[in-house]
Amino acid sequence: MEEVGRISHYFSRIGVAAVVLKKPLRVGDRVRIKGSKTDFEMIIDSMEIDNQKIEQAMAGDEVGIKVNDKVRKRDMVYRID
């Protein structure tokens, strides 16, 4: 597992997390989101920057991803190989 980013905000109404990336991330990647009260795995199905759908994002980008469960600010996002 390698750390790819950190949750910066969670939009509970629409189930979307804002993630600041430290490494590139793409649609189809399997990730684990882990924090003090959070721990689940999912595949990235949808990713956006400024309401525009994208397939891949680079380090330094802040992306919105649809998440399967509640996440919290500062939860870590890891890519699973």
Image: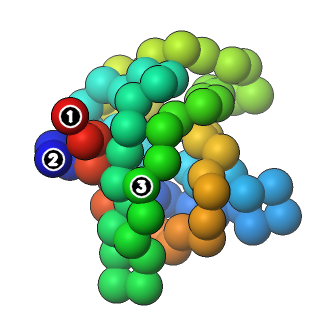
Of the 4 image quadrants, the one containing the C terminus is top left
Residue occupying the point 15% across, 47% down: 1
Classify 24 as above or below 10: above
Q: Give percent across and percent down for residue 8.
A: 48, 59
The residue most toward the right is 13
Mark 3 secondary-structure assignment? strand
Tell me the CA gap for discs 1 and 3: 12 Å
Q: Is residue 75 at all visible to an observer of this figure?
A: no
Q: Would you say 23 lies left or right of 54 here? A: left
Quadrant of the image occupied by residue 38: bottom left
Circle 1 is placed at which residue position? 81
Count of marks overlaid on the render: 3
Circle 2 is placed at which residue position? 1
Q: Of the residues under marks 2 and 1, which one precedes in the sequence?
A: 2
Of the residues shown, which amino acid type is indicated by label 1? Asp
Classify 52 as above or below 22: above
Tell me the CA gap for discs 3 and 2: 12 Å
Tell me, for residue 64, which label it has, or none.
none
Q: Would you say 20 lies left or right of 10 here? A: left
Of the residues shown, which amino acid type is indicated by label 2? Met
Mark 2 secondary-structure assignment? loop
Circle 3 is placed at which residue position? 41
Q: Is residue 65 at all visible to an observer of this figure?
A: yes
Q: Give percent across and percent down for residue 9.
A: 57, 61
The residue most toward the top is 55
The residue most toward the left is 1
Quadrant of the image occupied by residue 69: bottom right
Mark 1 secondary-structure assignment? loop
**5 and 27: which is toward the camera:** 27
